[in-house]
Amino acid sequence: MKLLRLGRLSGEATWILAGQATSILGTLALIRLLTEHISVAAYGKWALCLSIVAIVNQVILGGIIAALARYHSIALEGNDLQGYLKGSRLVIKRATLGVCAIAVLVLLALTLLDQTDWIPLALVLVAFALLSGYNSCLAAIRSAARSHLIVAIHNGAGPWLTSLLVANFMRWSELSVLMIAVAYASSASLIFLSQLILFKKATAKNSDKVAEKNSEDWAEAIIKFSLPISLFGVFTWAQQISDRWALEHYSSTDTVGQYAVLFQLGFTPSMLCIGLVMQFLAPILYKISGAATDSDRNRQVKRVALSAVVISLLGTLILFSIALTLHASIFQLLTASRYWAISHYLPWMVLAGGLFGAGELIALKAISEIKVGTITKVKIVTSLFGISFNIVGACFFGLNGVVAAVLSFGVFYFIWMLIATTRLHPSLIHN
């Protein structure tokens, strides 16, 4: 039995690693393509567009995505997957209506302000935000069910498909921010269509089972779990976009473009690597914890989580050392020459991403125990400090200041998350 379990875990880890590696390589190829064919200012504008899109995934759907992943194991243990899936669809439909209502208000505001030129881009961004959110919802359920092969295929295919669409668009006309948005939305729609078809096939065999729990009850449980995450999601979203918008206000759109590339090559890969650990670990922790009512199971969750945090910190130090040595070569390989002058910031962004990711691993423990309130205060307060760091850094020191602000936030977030969690649950250290 142990050999079979080890074999399954090894297989899951392999698929997750393959999917993340393919996704990272695709993202790097897309960065190279875009930096080579659009101006630094245009890249900065696209980064600002993405920061607005993030509000859907982080605030409106962010909590729902986390809830879908967490409650799958509870539904499976209670033999009520159909009720869970019906409740999930109900919550996603309500969130979609909320996004559409906000979109209508934004379009009306653009019309009243005589900014109708922005309407086509706004419409495409709304479509992209919803489609990417739906993909995240399906991926969350699939990951919770440990269907890592399907998740790996779609995660890996996304950036490569986007690159292919961008390259084809360039054959017909000059690349613009609107065309980039269309490429991203088109890629997300194809990925969603594929995910949806496979998901329906996978769940069809359970369609004859009668739900034991009313779908409204599942929807209520999912919403109750997701609301604190969406609440602090407002603050974390604001913190994560404040660096770009502060640079836009105090420096220039060109500086935003430089910073966006730096962030994608430094902070994001560190987060993706730790995301690999989280994707592998989350369904295991959720299964171990169950409904989070058994103290022995919760102690086991804490031990596994602490081990993952230590591994992530060691991995971060390795990536930091690589970036410290090879930052110039990395930029020369992956970006156009106009970005090479900022390569020396890369190691510090790698370190910032790793520290933030380690903090997210600690947060995962609290989510596994269905104790979101434990991390809500930390998320909100550290985000407010992070926003202040970014504004002050951009105002007085430009790009230098924002890089320092992001690193300071990573350190601050990790330390406070660790202190808050261990203070409330000292057995994280002693067991």
Image: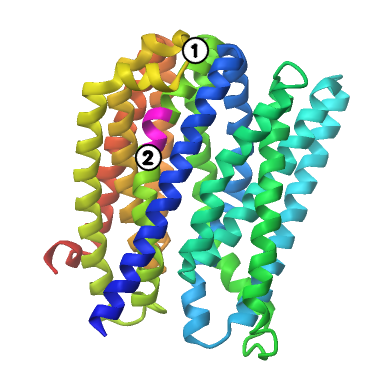
Judge from the rendering whether residue 328 lies leftward or rightward of residue 34; answer left or right.
left
Where is 421 relative to 106, above or below? below
Q: Quadrant of residue 222?
A: bottom right
Name which residue lies at 77% across and 54% down.
97
Q: Residues within 10 Å of mark 2 (few under 14, many from 20)?
A: many
The answer to whether residue 318 of the structure is visible from this angle is yes
Front one among 151 and 428: 151
Earlier in the chain: of badge 2 and badge 1, it is 1
Q: Position of residue 313 (x, y in %)?
A: 22, 45
Name which residue lies at 76% across and 36% down.
124
Judge from the rendering whether residue 133 lies leftward or rightward of residue 298; answer left or right.
right
Q: CA distance from mark 2 to mark 1?
A: 25 Å
Front one among 271 and 220: 271
Q: Main secondary structure of the magenta part?
A: helix
Q: Which mark is residue 255?
A: 1
Q: Amino acid at mark 2?
A: Thr
Name which residue lies at 54% across and 11% down.
254
Q: Quadrant of residue 109?
A: top right
Of helix, strand and loop, which one carries label 1?
Answer: helix
Front one among 286 and 388: 286
Q: Which residue is mark 2?
A: 382
Give the residues in magenta.
265-269
Q: Quadrant of residue 182?
A: top right
Based on the picture, tell me whether residue 78 belongs to the magenta stretch.
Answer: no
Based on the picture, tell me whether residue 266 belongs to the magenta stretch.
Answer: yes
Q: Amino acid at mark 1?
A: Thr
Quadrant location of the N terminus in the rendered image? bottom left
Q: Position of residue 11 (x, y in %)?
A: 36, 66
Q: Position of residue 44 (x, y in %)?
A: 57, 19
